[in-house]
């Protein structure tokens, strides 16, 4: 007599990642999914819009939402638009919240603001300490009081993929039993659900600009893609712009004899070629528009 197989319950839901800037949310999301969906850099404001991306396995489906980092004090016009957007996401139909903390950074006003936001939400919550590979400095004791307010606490290394399997398991433990929300068999043009090809390419260019330029510049620039077309010779042509507030910043982005914009363009082109497995011709220019932030988000 054959044993009756026990059918596993299929779980699906939305999971929001929240944390202060540079806590490692984008790196965590990229490594959980096994491919790049969100740009990363060691500078604030890297993630300016929520990124939706899906994870599938035999247990079910997780739709991750990578929210922009919460700033404690906002003064520039870009940050003023980012904070409300992150808070709006948490008020939507989210099933699980992951609060990601970089334990190697001391608790400050940004963390206090996030804690206040999360306390108002009655959803399953996971407290996740990132950068477990770093031993010193460590501020775990500064956050110990939070553990009793969360359903589960984990320590991970987003960069080295340590304990990410345990995090996925914890998420599934708190997701509702229901059918998949996103058709997993339907191929998508880019890894992120809410991002078309032009936006994805623009994000890659912005990431490289952040990495090559000085600290203050991320607050002054954005990027846009005007054209993506496949040529008869097998090359993909991309026409794109880096947009900044003033001519002073434009000169810094272009660099001496155009060296800086060439480096940014070369780095972006190489990553896009790897991602698309096609030869890329990137026509990248810099322009000034003091009002570009008005259309942000």
Image (cartoon, rainbow, N blue to C red):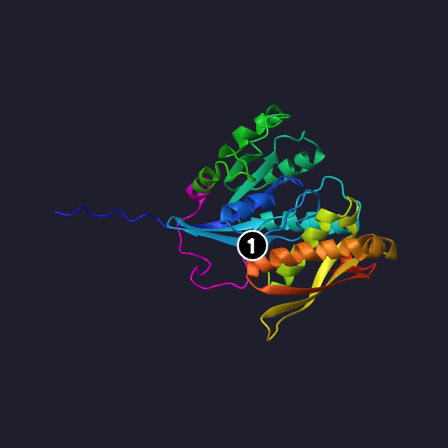
Q: In which quadrant is the C terminus drawn?
A: bottom right
How far across and down, in percent of the image, does residue 115 sit? 63, 36
Task: From the viewer's perspective, tell me whether residue 147 is left or right of residue 138.
Answer: left
User: From this viewpoint, which residue is outermost toward the top?
Assistant: 141
Q: Could one spot residue 95 in this view of the protein?
A: no
Residue at the far bottom: name it.
232
Q: How many marks?
A: 1
Image: magenta residue range: 170-191
At x 50% / y 49%, what residue is drawn? Answer: 34
* Closer to us: 256 or 135: 256
Image coordinates for residue 21, horizontal then vertical, percent: 67, 41
Q: Quadrant of residue 243?
A: bottom right
Q: Is residue 200 above or below residue 158?
A: below
Q: Residue furthest right?
A: 248
User: Quadrant of residue 232 in the image?
Assistant: bottom right
Nearest the camera: 64 or 89?
64
């Amino acid at each position: 007599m054959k044993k009756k197989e026990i059918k596993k319950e299929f779980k699906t839901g939305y999971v929001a990642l929240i944390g202060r800037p540079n806590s490692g949310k984008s790196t965590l999301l990229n490594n959980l999914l096994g491919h790049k969906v969100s740009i990363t850099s060691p500078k604030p404001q890297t993630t300016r819009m929520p990124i939706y991306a899906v994870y599938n396995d035999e247990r079910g489906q997780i739709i991750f939402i990578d929210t922009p980092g919460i700033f404690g004090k906002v003064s520039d016009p870009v940050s003023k638009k980012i904070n409300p957007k992150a808070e709006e996401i948490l008020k939507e139909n989210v099933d699980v919240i992951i609060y990601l903390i970089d334990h190697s950074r001391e608790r400050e006003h940004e963390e206090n603001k996030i804690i206040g936001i999360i306390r108002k939400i009655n959803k399953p919550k996971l407290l996740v300490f990132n950068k477990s590979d770093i031993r010193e400095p460590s501020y775990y004791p500064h956050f110990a009081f939070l553990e009793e307010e969360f359903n589960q606490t984990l320590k991970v290394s987003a960069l080295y993929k340590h304990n990410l399997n345990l995090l996925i398991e914890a998420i599934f433990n708190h997701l509702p039993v229901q059918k998949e929300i996103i058709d997993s068999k339907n191929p998508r043009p880019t890894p992120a659900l809410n991002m078309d090809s032009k936006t994805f390419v623009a994000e890659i260019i912005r990431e490289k600009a952040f990495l090559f330029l000085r600290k203050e510049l991320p607050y002054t620039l954005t990027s846009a893609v005007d054209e993506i077309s496949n040529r008869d010779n097998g090359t993909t042509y991309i026409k794109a712009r880096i947009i900044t507030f003033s001519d002073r910043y434009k000169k810094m982005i272009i660099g001496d004899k155009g060296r800086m914009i060439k480096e940014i363009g070369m780095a972006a082109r190489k990553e896009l070629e790897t991602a698309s497995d096609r030869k890329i011709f990137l026509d990248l220019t810099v322009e000034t528009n003091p009002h570009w932030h008005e259309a942000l988000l």
